[in-house]
Image (cartoon, grey):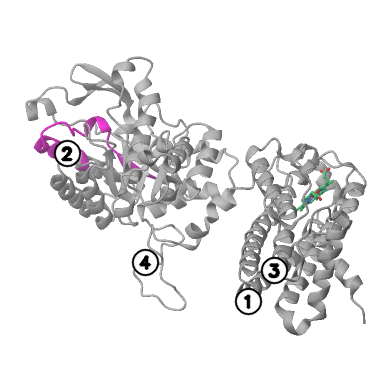
């Protein structure tokens, strides 16, 4: 597995005395203390201990070998940005260190590449230096996350970012000059508290200012240290965006819409955080970044990702695949394939980074990250168990989507009894529901390839999770008309699920809407006062009976009736196949949800969504 580290730093072994060169104090300088060790000083002030990996490619390459890193993209240090200095000094300083970076890379046996720095306080000068650097071999640029009081949504910075996109330069945003320093004089808090907040501020400024609506999607921009506190607080930002107009800013979409415009590195130092980051930002958007060889860097570069529980494919993306796209560098396997080759049938065009792709549209990396087995070491069949259930839930989602549309069409049909379009549309969508359910009945056979002993090996870890808690299954039942308030109790632990089921209980069901439409058409007399449930049921069955008796006039409604009946029938088939699976796998054991298992489930076989449609068949005569 190739490994690319996109966030690490260097210092040259020596550089001119900048204070003397520019005639101003407090520039960084290097004080060699003993062989292979040095201190970075800023004026008279100690800034940081460093060692020879910063300047000696031999040491660097040895440590890269030790850690299994193939390629590093080195950057200078924010302390050298000099955004608050006269532009000619900042430009000269940038040139010195940009050329020093290339010199170090030239001794790196092809395993060191670099990001340049630019005098960002002056847009023209920054753009020119970037162009010069890209022409001389840098892969992109490291910028600070603000210029004094100006955030990244400053018009000058936006112009510069446009220029980066045009030049094909990757951008690494590094926090610096941390906010609230007066309140954080101790314990490295500017690094541990200030830096994450700075980075979050930058991402939020870019999003809310609408910058991503204007910047080309080809811009590749990465935020250091996992994007700071951004991912963790995205929910808060999103909530504010939806509920408080003043918090909306100028962006066209909610903040989460722009996640596919940013990358973050993996410098978060905690497995749970890495896992969360991959879930929140996306497996295609996190890249190995180590902060090597600084004291706060990852000690064994790449170990956080390697030791994680992420899938192999995801690890490969984080360790190198995503960086290859971000940096636009060729992979070993694609070495022979030239992106500029004309497209032929055998070699379709290679999509430009940042453009919509199959994976980014379908969120494939995120989808493949959603299987989180409980068994450790992983029991081979647990992945299948999770995937089959997830597939069911995805189809349940589509069923609800279609059934809601059936309800809407039947409501319209009731409101306009002479229009047939809505009735046809309802029948068409119901046909889709029956086809989906047919697949769902069949799918149980895949789970039956799992031996009962294999399931029992990890079943205990799943308690007290149970199919009783499938919110969508219960929603389908409630939506179709099979409403049982008692079932709500299984959803108490999840308030959102509880609330949406409660809403389904209160809303008119498909069954209600169907008979409402028959009433509107005059085929069913509305129930008067004191009419018993039984009498109402009989009247509804009779109304269906009348439809069937006059096939010539009611062909469209009969089609709806047939589809509803078929759907009902297939749901019973689903229940039956589920019971067979349950008996095959756990026999007559109790369920993890506390029911008596198969014997409880058998009681559900008599449940019907549309009993009047079945009753009408009994009423029909030859
Ligand atoms: C090894 C495979 C399976 C076993 C052993 C199993 C077992 C059970 C048991 C015993 C129950 C009764 C409730 C309880 O006490 O927990 C139940 C309910 C349920 N299961 Fe499964 N199940 C399996 C697979 C599936 C699959 C693949 C789905 C797909 C979504 C599913 C969906 C449901 C649903 C929706 C219920 C509630 C049914 C109702 O209340 O009518 N189950 N399951």
Which residue is most to the front?
A: 529
Name the foreground residue: 161 vs 138: 161
Work out whether residue 137 can be spotted. Answer: no
**Which mark's residue is nearer the viewer, 3 or 2?**
3
**Which residue is located at x 86 percent, y 41 percent?**
595
Q: Is residue 331 left or right of residue 534?
A: left
The response on whether ligand 1 sits within 8 Å of label 4 is no
Element type where label 3 sits in the image: helix
Mark 3 vs 2, N-terminal side? 2
Mark number for residue 116?
Answer: none
Q: Looking at this rendering, what residue extends furthest in the top direction?
A: 186
Label 4 to label 3: alpha-carbon separation? 46 Å
The answer to whether residue 53 is left or right of residue 271 is: left
Q: Is residue 88 magenta?
A: yes
Query: Whole-percent x and y of residue 583?
Result: 90, 52
The residue carrying mark 2 is: 121
Spot occupied by residue 435 in the image (x, y as percentages of width and height): 72, 69
Query: Compared with residue 296, is residue 607 higher up or lower down, i.e. above or below?
Result: below
- Nearer-N-terminus badge (2/1): 2
- Disc 4: which residue: 339
> Which dot marks residue 430?
3
Return the residue found at the far left: 23
Q: How far is mark 3 from mark 1, CA to CA?
A: 21 Å
Residue 540 in sight from this viewpoint = yes
Of pointers 3 and 1, the one earlier in the residue sequence: 1
**Residue at image coords 88%, 45%:** 597
Write down the region rendered in magenta.
Answer: 71-98
């Amino acid at each position: 597995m190739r490994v690319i580290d996109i966030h690490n730093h260097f210092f040259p072994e020596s550089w001119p005395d900048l204070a003397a060169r520019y005639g101003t104090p407090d520039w960084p300088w290097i004080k060699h203390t003993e062989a292979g060790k040095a201190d970075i000083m800023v004026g008279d002030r100690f800034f940081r201990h460093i060692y020879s990996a910063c300047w000696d490619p031999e040491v660097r390459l040895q440590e890269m070998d030790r850690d299994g890193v193939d390629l590093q993209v080195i950057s200078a240090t924010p302390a050298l940005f000099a955004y608050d200095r006269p532009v000619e000094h900042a430009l000269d300083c940038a040139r010195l260190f940009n050329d020093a970076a290339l010199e170090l890379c030239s001794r790196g046996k092809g395993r060191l590449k670099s990001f340049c720095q630019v005098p960002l306080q002056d847009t023209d000068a920054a753009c020119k230096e970037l162009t010069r650097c890209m022409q001389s071999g840098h892969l992109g640029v490291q910028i600070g996350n603000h210029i004094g009081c100006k955030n990244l949504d400053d018009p000058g910075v936006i112009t510069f970012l446009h220029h980066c996109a045009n030049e094909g330069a990757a951008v690494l945003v590094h926090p610096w000059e941390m906010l609230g320093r007066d309140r954080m004089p101790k314990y490295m808090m500017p690094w541990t508290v200030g830096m994450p907040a700075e980075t979050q501020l930058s991402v939020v400024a870019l999003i809310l200012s609408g910058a991503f609506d204007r910047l080309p999607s080809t811009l590749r921009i990465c935020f250091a240290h996992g994007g700071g506190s951004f991912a963790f607080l995205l929910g808060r930002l999103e909530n504010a965006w939806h509920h408080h107009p003043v918090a909306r800013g100028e962006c066209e979409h909610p903040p989460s819409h722009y996640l596919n415009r940013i990358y973050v590195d993996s410098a978060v130092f905690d497995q749970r955080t890495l896992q969360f980051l991959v879930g929140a930002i996306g497996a295609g958007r996190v890249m190995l970044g180590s902060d090597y060889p600084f004291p706060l860097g990852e000690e064994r570069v790449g170990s956080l990702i390697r030791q994680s529980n992420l899938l192999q494919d995801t690890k490969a993306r984080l360790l190198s695949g995503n960086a290859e796209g971000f940096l636009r560098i060729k992979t070993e396997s694609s070495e022979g394939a030239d992106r500029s080759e004309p497209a032929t049938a055998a070699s379709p065009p290679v999509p430009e980074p940042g453009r919509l792709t199959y994976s980014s549209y379908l969120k494939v990396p995120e989808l493949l990250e959603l299987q989180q087995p409980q068994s450790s070491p992983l029991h081979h069949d647990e992945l299948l168990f999770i995937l089959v259930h997830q597939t069911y839930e995805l189809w349940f989602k589509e069923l609800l989507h279609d059934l809601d549309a059936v309800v809407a069409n039947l409501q319209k049909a009731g409101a306009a009894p002479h229009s047939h379009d809505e009735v046809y549309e309802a029948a068409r969508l119901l046909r889709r529901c029956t086809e989906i359910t047919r697949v769902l009945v069949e799918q149980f056979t895949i789970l039956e390839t799992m031996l009962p002993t294999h399931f029992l090996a990890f079943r205990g870890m799943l308690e007290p999770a149970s199919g009783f808690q499938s919110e969508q299954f219960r929603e389908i039942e409630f939506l179709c008309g099979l409403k049982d308030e008692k079932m709500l109790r299984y959803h108490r632990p999840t308030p959102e699920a509880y609330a949406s089921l409660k809403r389904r209980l209160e809303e008119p069901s498909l069954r209600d809407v169907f008979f409402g439409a028959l009433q509107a058409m005059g085929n069913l007399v509305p129930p008067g006062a004191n009419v018993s449930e039984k009498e109402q049921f009989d009247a509804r069955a009779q109304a269906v009976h009348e439809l069937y008796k006059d096939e010539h006039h009611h062909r469209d409604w009969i089609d709806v009736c047939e589809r509803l009946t078929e759907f009902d029938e297939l749901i019973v088939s689903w229940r039956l196949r589920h019971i067979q699976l349950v008996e095959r796998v756990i026999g007559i054991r109790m369920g993890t949800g506390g029911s008596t298992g198969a014997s409880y489930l058998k009681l559900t076989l008599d449940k019907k969504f549309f009993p009047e449609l079945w009753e009408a068949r009994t009423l029909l005569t030859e």
